[in-house]
Image (cartoon, grey):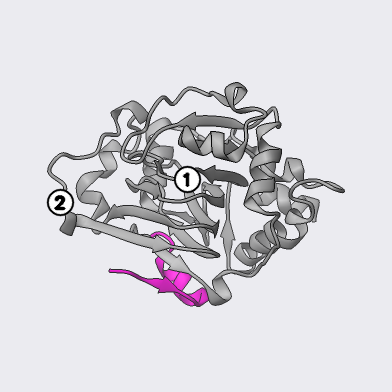
Amino acid sequence: MHTTISTTADFIQNWDSRINFLMDGACVPFSYEFPSTEDIVTSLQEEEATTAITGEKRETGDASNVIDSFRGKSLDDLSARHFQLRYPDVTNLDCAGGLFEGITEQVIIPWKQYLLENDFGWDRCYVLARVSGPDTCTGYHMDRSNVLFWNVRGRKLFHGFKDPDRWAPIERALDRRSDQIMPEDAKGEDLLTYDVGDNAFLWNHLFTPHWVDAPELTFGINFSHGGLRHKGRMCRFEEHVYDLTGKNPNESWHPETSSNAFLQAT
C-alpha cells in the first residue's frame, strides 16, 4: 500500500485516488533552504498571527490558542509543554530579511506553475508553516483541503487508513471537527502509516481521516488546495460538498490565491 509518486503522469492519475502517497522527482519542482528549526521557533513565537496548542502524543489536548503563554520561552521550556505552532501564510514573512525570504519565488510560484502546466486549476492554494515539539500529535481529523505536506526536518508518523472511505464515507464530508472521532474498532491492519524524515513530501487527500505523531522536534509546511481541478474536474468528495452547499465554499477562503488570480498576476 505504501506508494511513492515520481512522475507527472502518475500524479495526474493518483491525485484524487483517496489513498495517500509520497512524492518526489518531477512532482517536486522546487527547493528551498530554510532557517534552522530553532530560529523558526524563536521567530514564530513573536508573530501576532501564530497560534499554539499543547498536547501529548495520542491526546489532542486543549485546542485553545495559548501563544501568549509561549512568547519569550526557550525551546526547552516549550518542549516540556508538548507545544505545536502554526503560522497561517508563509508569504507574509517573505520580505527582505524575513524568516521565509524568497519562498514565494523559489517554492510557491514553481508549484503553481507546475499545476497549471499540467491542466490543474484551483480556487485556493496557500502555504502554512507548522512546528511540532517532541512527543506531540495532531489528533484524529479530516482536512477540507488536498494537502501537499512537506516534512522539512525531523521525524513524523503520518497515520491514515488503507480504505479511508470505509471509515469516513462521503456522507460525512461535512462533519464538524468535534464529530471526527477515531473509530473504536479500527485495528492495526487497517492503518496506512508513513514514517517520514527530512525533506519528505506526502499528498494527503481531502476528507481522508488521519493523525500525525511527532516523536521529536519537527518543522514542515503544508500546501493547502481548495477546489483543485484537473481539466475542470474536482475529486468526487469536493464535488459532493459543492453540490450539498450549493456554492463554492472557497469564495471567502483565500480567494486571492486562486489559479485565476495567479494567472492575472503573472
Q: Which residue is nearer to you in this view: 143 or 73?
A: 73
Q: Which residue is mark 2?
A: 187
- Residue at 28 percent across and 37 percent down: it is 172
- Residue at 31 percent across and 59 percent down: it is 193
Q: Which residue is nearer to you in this view: 98 or 256?
A: 98
Is residue 255 shown above or below 219? above
User: What kind of element bears circle 1?
Assistant: loop
- Residue at 79 percent across and 56 percent down: it is 102
Return the x and y of residue 42 as percentages of the image width and height: 68, 39
Q: Are marks 2 and 1 in contact (CB under 8 Å)?
A: no
Return the x and y of residue 191 as percentages of the image width and height: 24, 56
Q: Quadrant of the C terminus?
A: bottom right
Instruction: Work out whether residue 194 can be spotted.
Output: yes
Q: Is residue 213 left or right of residue 87?
A: left
Give the class, few, some or many, for how many residues have Cα within 10 Å of label 2's Cα (few <14, many ≥20). few
Name which of mark 2 and mark 1 comes first in the sequence. Answer: 1
- Residue at 50 percent across and 39 percent down: it is 79
Q: Which residue is mark 1?
A: 145
Is residue 265 shown above or below 245? below
Q: Say whether residue 122 is magenta.
A: no
Return the x and y of residue 144 as percentages of the image width and height: 44, 41
Q: Which residue is nearer to you in this view: 199 or 103?
A: 199
Instruction: Work out whether residue 248 can be spotted.
Output: no
Return the x and y of residue 108 as percentages of the image width and height: 68, 56
Q: Choose top left, top right, bottom left or bottom right for residue 162.
A: bottom left
Q: Say whether residue 7 is magenta.
A: yes
Q: Amino acid at mark 2?
A: Lys
Q: Which residues are magenta?
A: 1-17
User: What kind of element bears circle 2?
Assistant: loop
Q: CA distance from mark 2 to mark 1?
A: 26 Å
